[in-house]
Image: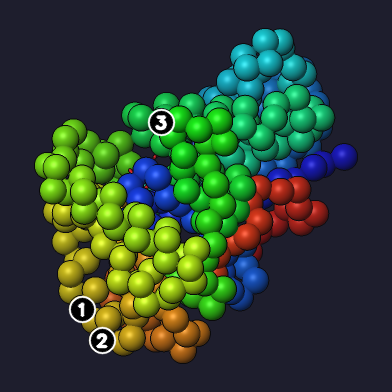
Amino acid sequence: MTQCYYAPASTGNVSVGFDLLGAAFEPVNGQRLGDVLAIRGECANTRLSLSGRYQHQLPADTDDNLILRCYQLFQQRLGKALPGLDLHLYKELPVGSGLGSSACSIVVACFAFNHYFSEPLSQVELLQLMAEAEGGVSGSVHYDNVAPSYLGGLQLMLPGSERLCRDLPWFEHWRVVLSYPGTTLSTKAARAAIPAQLPLKTSIEFAAGLSRFVSALYCQDEAEAIAALKDVVAEPARALLMPELPVLRQALMELGVVHVGISGAGPTVFALCQTEQVAAKAASYLASHYEKNQDAMTHICRLASAGARSVKDPIPCS
Ligand SMILES: Nc1ncnc2c1ncn2[C@@H]1O[C@H](COP(=O)(O)OP(=O)(O)O)[C@@H](O)[C@H]1O
Ligand SMILES: N[C@@H](CCOP(=O)(O)O)C(=O)O
């Protein structure tokens, strides 16, 4: 019997937490925004078929698909060969978009294999495997997409801790408009733009911004949390890759948006709104001023409290 699994889109960094903060999001209209993997049964040799809105952005050769890479890694981690699987990926997240597309496929695959084979890996072991697979794509291990896509919510990474990450509070009424223009930006290339070293002043500003944001979330001090949202690491370094951002920001703030940032490595932008009304205006503005082609999409989202999971319906809405 076919078993289907889903993992949601994610926004890495959330402006103040380069590589350390990430959030899973879902459209408020009930659509899915993420990949679905179906395990259709067992067969002699593992095979993968593809469909979905962004299937055309994937490597032509399915041997290069991360889903199959994850199955190899999963078997290596268990130290034994597993049966061949008949797999189908519904690719609903655009690649190189800043929405954690590679992480989403990695998460849904690792979660599915672990569930299908009766959970041989613990949550922490599975998260480590996901981060290792993501590091193979982006050039360095970072958890800020895989952790929220796997676990849901807003996740703070805890390097050096056995926990790996922790769920943070959020503001229930916050809406985030995610707008993808339809063009791609390679995460690896965008990471190469970040300086290897930061001046002490910037390091202190970064630590201060992240601490201020996290403490404001715990205190539920909304004004303080919004005031803390300033990207001093990725956005200055990636300004040339996102030349439209200043103009978009000015127009969106005039509409009542309280913060505009880069989702992951871009080019998706995220606009933080305190009301549905402002979110609707921001979405309409971005759809007409930032979308560039038929691959583009704009969604009004809320935090997705659930991460990767089994689903009954294999056909995602997008
Ligand atoms: N299932 C998959 N989902 C997304 N990317 C994949 C998948 N399989 C292989 N890839 C490759 O992984 C790379 C992902 O690029 P990247 O810039 O990291 O995307 P993103 O930032 O959206 O995660 C691309 O070269 C893409 O072709
Ligand atoms: N912290 C990473 C996040 C990359 O996210 P993606 O969705 O663009 O892959 C970074 O900023 O490089």
Q: Is residue 216 visible?
A: yes
Q: CA distance from mark 2 to mark 3?
A: 38 Å
The reply to whether the C-beta atoms of the residues labelled 2 and 1 are less than 8 Å apart is yes
Per the image, the residue denoted by label 2 is: 254
The percent coordinates of residue 203 (x first, y second) are: 20, 45
Across and down, in percent, residue 273 comes to 42, 78
Q: Nearer the viewer, residue 203 or 286?
A: 203
Residue type at tag 1: Gln
| Position in image of residue 176 (x %, y %) | 45, 71
Q: Residues within 10 Å of mark 1 (few under 14, many from 20)?
A: few
Q: Secondary structure at mark 2?
A: helix
Q: Which residue is mark 1?
A: 250
As drawn, the residue found furthest toward the right would be 1
Q: Quadrant of residue 267?
A: bottom left
| Residue tagged 3 | 141
Q: Label 2 neighbourhood size at 10 Å, few (<14), some (14-19), many (20+)?
A: few
**In the rendered structure, which amino acid carries the disc numbered 3?**
Val
Residue type at numbered disc 2: Glu
Dot 3, crowdedness within 10 Å: few (<14), some or many (≥20)? some
Residues at marks 1 and 3, CA–CA distance in whole angstroms: 34 Å
Ligand 1 sits in which quadrant? top left
Residue displayed at 37% across by 77% down: 223
Q: Eyeballing the image, is 89 above or below 281?
A: above
Q: Is residue 151 above or below residue 275?
A: above
Mark 2 and mark 1: span between their CA atoms?
A: 6 Å
